[in-house]
């Protein structure tokens, strides 16, 4: 009798370990989808904020007037950061890039002073750029504007494409994960189907019968989520060791949301699968239980 009980405990223990491992693997995949989705969003915002609008100032504009114009632009809702590049600095940068000094044969500095405006991510799109350019062009202190509209369109198009791909992956993985975990939970509950039927015969309510299965599902979901988050955390740490600049895109907010989503998915999926599996056997009669 003692050996039989030990055998039952061992089987249940192995079932719990199998369920925990399979749930962990699924949660790692779901966590990767969430992580890459949030990282792609941050990467897009990071790239957009490095797209600049170069405002070429008129030569007649004095240094004080240029700095006053710069301060005015800082109060505009679209300005993330503004760098003032003087005529002398622009000439030095061009000499460094070209390897020759055009002022030597022209006799004057042909490069205008500029304001390099980094746009906020929300304004780095074609529609916003139209009225920003129109507003800046109307200013009498501006001689010309230069901006990379095509690059901005490519960034927005790539973001939309990545978002669609990640959404499709998330739906497919959610379906696959639910199927895999459901099958594993169903096998675990199947081994105790006659105990469930016996409890029904002695008058136990469905809620009372379900309770231990749901508690176990919560524990398995939490443990699997902790293991999945540990694996994901080690992966992010490994990437950070190779690319320290990764923290500009992978923020603590991204890590916290990913960890929370993994925990939430782990608990919800395991509890839902346990609920459905137990209800299935609760609805069966004794004859049906022997046939399956």
Image (tube, rainbow, N blue to C red):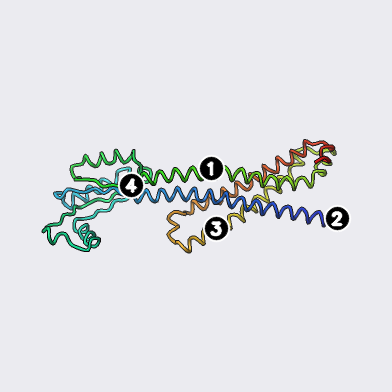
Q: Residues within 10 Å of mark 1 (few under 14, many from 20)?
A: few
Residue for badge 1? 168
Q: Residues within 10 Å of mark 4 (few under 14, many from 20)?
A: many
Check whether the beta carbons of the residues at disc 3 and disc 4 lie within 8 A of each other.
Answer: no
Coordinates of residue 131 in the picture (x, y in percent): 29, 38
Q: Secondary structure at mark 3?
A: helix
Task: Find the distance from the CA under tag 1 to the CA under tag 2.
Answer: 47 Å
Q: Residues within 10 Å of mark 2 (few under 14, many from 20)?
A: few
Task: Find the distance from the CA under tag 2 to the CA under tag 4.
Answer: 71 Å
Q: Secondary structure at mark 2?
A: helix
Horizontal side of residue 113 vs 163, given as left or right? left
Coordinates of residue 102 in the picture (x, y in percent): 16, 59
Numbered badge on residue 119:
4
Q: Nearer the viewer, mark 1 or mark 2?
A: 1
Q: Residue at x 27, y 53 (%)?
A: 83
Q: Secondary structure at mark 1?
A: helix
Q: Residue at x 42, y 46 (%)?
A: 158
Horizontal side of residue 154 vs 88, given as left or right? right
Residue for badge 2? 4
Residue for badge 3? 233
Check whether the beta carbons of the residues at disc 1 and disc 2 lie within 8 A of each other.
Answer: no
Task: Find the distance from the CA under tag 3 to the CA under tag 4.
Answer: 32 Å
């Amino acid at each position: 009798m003692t050996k039989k009980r030990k055998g039952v405990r061992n089987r249940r223990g192995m079932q719990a370990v199998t369920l925990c491992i399979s749930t962990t693997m699924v949660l790692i995949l779901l966590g990767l989808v969430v992580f890459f989705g949030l990282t792609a969003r941050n990467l897009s915002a990071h790239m957009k904020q490095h797209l600049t609008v170069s405002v070429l100032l008129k030569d007649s504009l004095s240094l004080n007037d240029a700095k006053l114009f710069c301060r005015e632009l800082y109060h505009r809702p679209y300005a993330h950061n503004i760098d003032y590049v003087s005529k002398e600095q622009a000439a030095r940068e061009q000499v460094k890039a070209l390897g020759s000094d055009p002022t030597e044969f022209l006799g004057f500095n042909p490069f205008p002073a500029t304001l390099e405006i980094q746009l906020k991510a929300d304004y780095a799109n074609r529609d916003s750029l139209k009225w920003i350019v129109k507003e800046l062009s109307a200013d009498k202190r501006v001689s010309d504007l230069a901006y990379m509209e095509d690059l901005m369109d490519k960034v927005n198009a790539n973001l939309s494409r990545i978002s669609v791909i990640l959404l499709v992956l998330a739906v497919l993985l959610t379906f696959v994960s639910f199927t895999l975990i459901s099958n594993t939970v169903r096998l675990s509950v199947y081994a105790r189907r006659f105990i469930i039927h016996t409890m029904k015969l002695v008058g136990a309510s469905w809620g009372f019968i379900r309770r231990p299965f749901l508690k176990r599902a919560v524990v398995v979901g939490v443990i699997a989520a902790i293991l999945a988050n540990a694996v994901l955390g080690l992966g992010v740490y490994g990437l950070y060791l190779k690319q320290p600049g990764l923290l500009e895109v992978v923020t603590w907010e991204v890590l916290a949301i990913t960890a929370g989503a993994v925990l939430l998915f782990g608990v919800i999926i395991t509890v839902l699968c346990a609920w459905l599996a137990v209800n299935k056997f609760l609805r069966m009669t004794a004859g049906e239980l022997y046939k399956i």
